[in-house]
């Protein structure tokens, strides 16, 4: 009987039934595992050059071939996942933290503070993501740490808008009014009453926007503003691959495919989670 | 309606001002001395200083700001220290390429995306629908520059139908279009994917509304219910969100211009950053934000046209 | 021409959900004669709205489906007609008005546009004539300055005015039957009275039959000729309005009647409540569907389901108390 399952078990079974979320989750997990266990599963050292085997296509030794320096493409792709996932996940986490805090504060306290915060958000969003990212990267430099900060800055306004909007609509809901009527103080209301309800939306957005962050990182790398060579990143590899596109298309194609699959997996996962949460929100 | 348009335009001006200021500040934060970049690392200190004087870089910040704003108003984008040419000439030369790229991609996205989304919504959970949704999802997950590279592979190796490099002669229509096709396709496919998804979910949402049931209860034919009652309501969020995505598309257009070596603001911008050509850089950024503000404005006005509930003030 | 306009026989409309089959309407029978007003009363979830939607074939089709029954309109089974034939009847011979006038009107079109739509569709009038007719209808429903209001959007009107606009829209082709699904529930009491007066007036002018669905006994008393009491997808009692109020036979009807607070009540009398809750359409109780909440339940009520039978002249009840074979058990 349904009532015997706990809330958690029910959500898990809903997750399992939802093919989109499942496929996305499995794929994303695979990518994460590849990134974590890169040193163990990578057949070669990604920096190891072998001038005798340059620009070879796939072979039994080098499954995906070698690049212009004789480095194994598959190994570089495996190691490249680390950069993409690290930047993607941490920058989104930073953006979520900063943006949500800003948005919730603006939405809850209203007035001048809200105007200030949300106007700044509006101004920042007048810049297309990539252009802002390029400008800030040029200012801060393109090492791993600063790239995370840069993309985190770019992601912040989105989260701020999301949190602000959610907060405004929830703030007028009756259970919040009830809590205020009893005299619960503002920070407690935000944390205990409002946040759990925004949490679902944030989770969906965060998952989906990891894809955006990864794409931004790849874009920057392709322009040459990403983590610098010889560190393998997927964006770098596509760029290097373009120079030899006609002879060895595999380099660009496979690294790009890795980006595509990774972003796709997070999109599927985010979509799936949203499907699970939404009908609950709407009430079937 | 006209009054509303004017008022919205006026409202955009302060925002534009602040954005310009932000551009000014960002460019000034960038590392590296533009004079050194222009003259090279081995130039003498005197030469560098002289150039700095000439570029006005030794003046206090507020003075530089005032010059910046007043120059902009006169349409003077300054002279690039790297190339020696006025920035406005460069911009005027490449701007049409960028404009035709972005606007054709946005337009195509709507032209193909809306009908595809409608067909997916009404054939919900059938084969066509699943097919549509998978393609949309892939379209949303692929970086524009990668799609461009794949198109280059197909159209240079397999079927050499279209040029893969350059922008062509803008005055020659057929040459122009031939050079526009692949870059625009890279962006348009992605925009179509996005609009298709939006349309599908928006229509499914509207189909649930009470007034659709009311329309059917009057005996209105299904096709008319869909295209009259449903579509117009469904378009409201599609336009709003499509406008937001168009801004993202502008960012992607930078990548596409680089991949196809196509003249445009994007290529200009990236070149400017690498060469520390800050005069060009700030002008290009200003222009990009103007385009964004214009797109937001147009979105707003179209939105207002469709939805009578928005108050005119 | 037969006196009977609409005859519903053994209507069953089920909803197929992940959690099981919800039998929203599970064997409804009733009859509406020309010019008659049938009041259908019941608590939420008893199947009254779904019956109405089934007549118009507007039930959301997954997950709902009309699985059995006949809906005879002027002798012809609506369920056997083609979709285009059904569309000719909707808005034309049978019209419907809904509970929430705010969400039931399309926000992006003027009320004039929406009222003219069925006129142009069914009566084939051109735009000018249709507009004139629409203004007449707005006038008939008591809207002030109809020639100005006609170009307003729904959000510019108050709740009462929107409901009037909906009524104008439903009546524009002079239907033979108007189905009104809780038309006044969302409105406040004074407006409610006005709308009911309006319906009564129009009904007389056009000679229209009305199916009034509500959970409010006062509304039933005000407008109905005959009353059908619905519960758990079935009809429990059917009689003319005076009889239903003077001699309610079914325990449920009696309980409904008793639960109304009265001005003459002394302070000491507690409000009567019907214990328990409306049953879940996914799982009806065995036997008589009302038995868990009934004061008079006996073991036969838990095992068998009573039929809807005539107790007196035209007074039908579904209860073993009135079954000649079983009456002795009570």
Image (cartoon, rainbow, N blue to C red):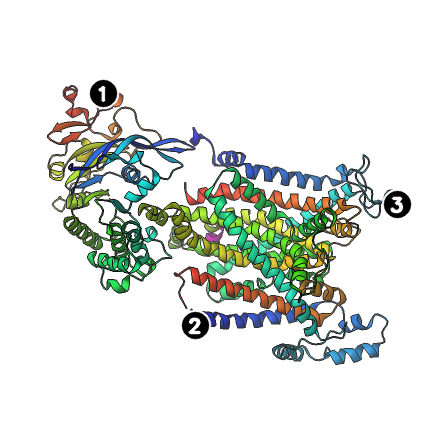
Q: Is residue C80 above or below residue C165?
A: above
User: Marks 3 and 2: in contact by CB < 8 Å?
Assistant: no
Q: Is residue A120 above or below residue A162?
A: below
- Given residues C52 and A32, the one toward you in this image is C52
Evaluate whether label 3 is on the same chain as label 1: no
Q: Is residue A190 magenta?
A: yes
Q: Secondary structure at mark 3?
A: helix
- Given residues A107 and A27, the one toward you in this image is A27
Question: Mostly what secondary structure, the magenta segment?
Answer: helix
Q: Give the Cα separation between the discs numbered 3 and 1.
A: 94 Å
Q: Is residue A2 above or below residue B239?
A: above
The x and y percentages for residue B268 are 70, 65
User: Dot 1, crowdedness within 10 Å: few (<14), some or many (≥20)?
Assistant: some
Q: Which mark is residue C300?
A: 1
State the residue position of label 3: A51
Q: Is residue B46 above or below residue B163?
A: below
User: Marks 2 and 1: in contact by CB < 8 Å?
Assistant: no
Q: Chain of mark 1?
A: C
- Given residues C185 and C117, the one toward you in this image is C117
Q: Which marked residue is nearer to the observer: mark 1 or mark 2?
A: 2
Q: How many numbered marks have been drawn onto this rendered protein structure?
A: 3
The x and y percentages for residue C179 are 24, 44
State the residue position of label 2: B3
The x and y percentages for residue B184 are 63, 56
The answer to whether residue A185 shows anywhere in this view is no
Which residue corresponds to the image point at 73% horizontal and 73% vertical from the top-left?
B80
Q: Secondary structure at mark 1?
A: helix
Which residue corresponds to the image point at 68% horizontal and 67% vertical from the top-left?
B94
Q: Give the Cα separation between the discs numbered 1 and 2.
A: 76 Å
Q: Which region of the structure is painted magenta?
A: A187-191
User: Dot 2, crowdedness within 10 Å: few (<14), some or many (≥20)?
Assistant: few
Evaluate whether label 2 is on the same chain as label 3: no
């Amino acid at each position: 009987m349904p009532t015997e399952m706990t809330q958690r078990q029910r959500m898990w079974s809903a997750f399992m039934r939802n093919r989109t979320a499942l496929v996305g989750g499995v794929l994303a997990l695979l990518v994460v595992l590849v990134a974590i266990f890169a040193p163990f599963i990578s057949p070669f050292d990604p920096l190891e050059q072998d001038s005798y085997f340059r620009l070879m296509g796939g072979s039994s030794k080098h499954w995906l071939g070698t690049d212009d320096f004789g480095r194994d493409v598959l190994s570089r792709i495996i190691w490249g996942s680390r950069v993409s996932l690290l930047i993607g996940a941490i920058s989104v986490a930073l953006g979520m933290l900063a943006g949500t805090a800003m948005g919730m504060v603006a939405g809850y306290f209203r007035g001048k503070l809200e105007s200030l915060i949300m106007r700044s958000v509006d101004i920042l969003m007048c810049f297309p993501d990539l252009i802002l990212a390029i400008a800030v990267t040029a200012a801060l430099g393109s090492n791993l740490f600063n790239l995370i900060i840069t993309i985190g800055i770019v992601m912040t306004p989105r989260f701020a808008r999301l949190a602000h909007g959610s907060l405004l609509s929830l703030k007028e809901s009756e259970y919040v009014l009830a809590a205020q009527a009893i005299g619960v103080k503002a920070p407690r209301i935000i944390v205990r009453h409002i946040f759990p309800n925004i949490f679902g939306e944030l989770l969906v957005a965060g998952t989906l926007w990891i894809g955006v962050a990864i794409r931004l990182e790849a874009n920057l790398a392709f322009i040459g503003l990403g983590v610098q060579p010889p560190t393998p990143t997927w964006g770098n590899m596509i760029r290097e691959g373009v120079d030899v596109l006609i002879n060895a298309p595999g380099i660009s194609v496979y690294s790009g495919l890795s980006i595509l699959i990774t972003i796709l997996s997070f999109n599927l996962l985010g979509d799936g989670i949203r499907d699970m949460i939404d009908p609950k929100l709407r009430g079937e | 309606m006209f009054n509303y348009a004017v008022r919205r335009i006026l409202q955009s001006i302060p925002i534009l001002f602040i954005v310009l200021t932000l551009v000014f500040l960002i460019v000034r934060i960038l590392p590296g001395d533009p004079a050194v970049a222009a003259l090279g690392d081995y130039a003498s200190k005197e030469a560098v200083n002289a150039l700095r004087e000439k570029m006005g870089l030794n003046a206090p910040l507020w003075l530089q700001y005032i010059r910046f704003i007043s120059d902009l108003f006169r349409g003077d984008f300054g002279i690039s220290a790297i190339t020696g040419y006025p920035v406005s000439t460069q911009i005027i030369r490449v701007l049409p390429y960028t404009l035709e790229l972005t606007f054709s991609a946005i337009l195509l996205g709507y032209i193909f995306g809306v009908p595809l989304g409608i067909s997916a919504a009404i054939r919900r959970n059938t084969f066509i629908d699943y097919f549509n949704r998978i393609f949309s999802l892939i379209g949303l997950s692929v970086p524009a520059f990668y799609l461009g590279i794949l198109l280059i592979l197909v159209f240079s190796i397999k079927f050499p139908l279209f040029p893969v490099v350059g922008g062509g002669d803008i005055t020659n229509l057929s040459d122009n279009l031939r050079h526009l096709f692949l870059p625009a396709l890279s962006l348009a496919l992605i925009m179509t994917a996005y609009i298709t998804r939006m349309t599908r979910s928006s229509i499914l949402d509207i189909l649930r509304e009470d007034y659709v049931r009311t329309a059917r209860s009057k005996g209105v034919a299904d096709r008319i219910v869909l295209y009259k009652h449903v579509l117009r309501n469904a378009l409201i969020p599609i336009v709003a969100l499509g406008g937001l995505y168009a801004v993202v598309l502008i960012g992607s257009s930078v990548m596409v211009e680089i991949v196809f070596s196509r003249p445009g603001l994007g290529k200009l911008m990236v070149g400017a950053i690498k060469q520390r050509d800050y005069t060009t850089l700030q002008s290009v950024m200003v222009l990009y934000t103007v385009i964004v503000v214009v797109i937001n404005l147009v979105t707003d006005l179209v939105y207002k046209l469709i939805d009578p509930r928005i108050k005119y003030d | 021409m037969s006196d009977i306009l609409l005859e519903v026989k053994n209507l069953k409309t089920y909803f197929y959900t992940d959690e099981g089959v919800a039998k929203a309407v599970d064997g409804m029978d009733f009859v509406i004669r020309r010019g008659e007003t049938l009041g259908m009363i019941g608590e939420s979830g008893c199947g009254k709205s779904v019956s109405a939607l089934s007549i118009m074939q507007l039930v959301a089709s997954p997950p709902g489906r009309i699985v059995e029954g006949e809906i005879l309109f002027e002798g012809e089974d609506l369920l056997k007609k083609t979709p285009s034939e059904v569309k000719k009847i909707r808005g034309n011979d049978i019209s419907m008005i809904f509970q929430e006038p705010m969400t039931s009107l399309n926000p992006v079109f003027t009320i004039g546009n929406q009222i003219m739509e069925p006129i142009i569709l069914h009566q084939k009038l051109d735009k000018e004539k249709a507009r004139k007719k629409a203004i007449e209808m707005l006038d008939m429903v008591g809207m002030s300055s109809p020639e100005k209001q006609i170009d307003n959007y729904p959000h510019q009107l108050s709740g009462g005015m929107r409901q009037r606009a909906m009524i104008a829209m439903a009546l524009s082709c002079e239907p033979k039957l108007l189905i009104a699904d809780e038309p006044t529930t969302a409105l406040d009491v004074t407006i409610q009275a006005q709308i009911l007066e309006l319906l009564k007036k129009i009904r007389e002018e056009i000679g229209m039959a009305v199916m009034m669905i509500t959970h409010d006994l006062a509304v039933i008393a005000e407008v109905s000729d005959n009353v059908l009491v619905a519960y758990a997808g079935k009809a429990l009692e059917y009689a003319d309005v005076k009889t239903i109020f003077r001699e309610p036979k079914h325990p449920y009807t009696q309980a409904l009647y008793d639960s109304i607070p009265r001005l003459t009540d002394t302070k000491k009398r507690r409000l009567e409540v019907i214990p328990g809750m409306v049953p879940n359409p996914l799982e009806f109780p065995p036997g008589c569907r009302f038995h868990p909440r009934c004061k008079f339940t006996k073991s036969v009520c838990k095992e068998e389901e009573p039929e809807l039978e005539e107790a007196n002249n035209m007074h039908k009840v579904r209860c073993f108390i009135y079954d000649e074979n079983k009456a002795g058990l009570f």
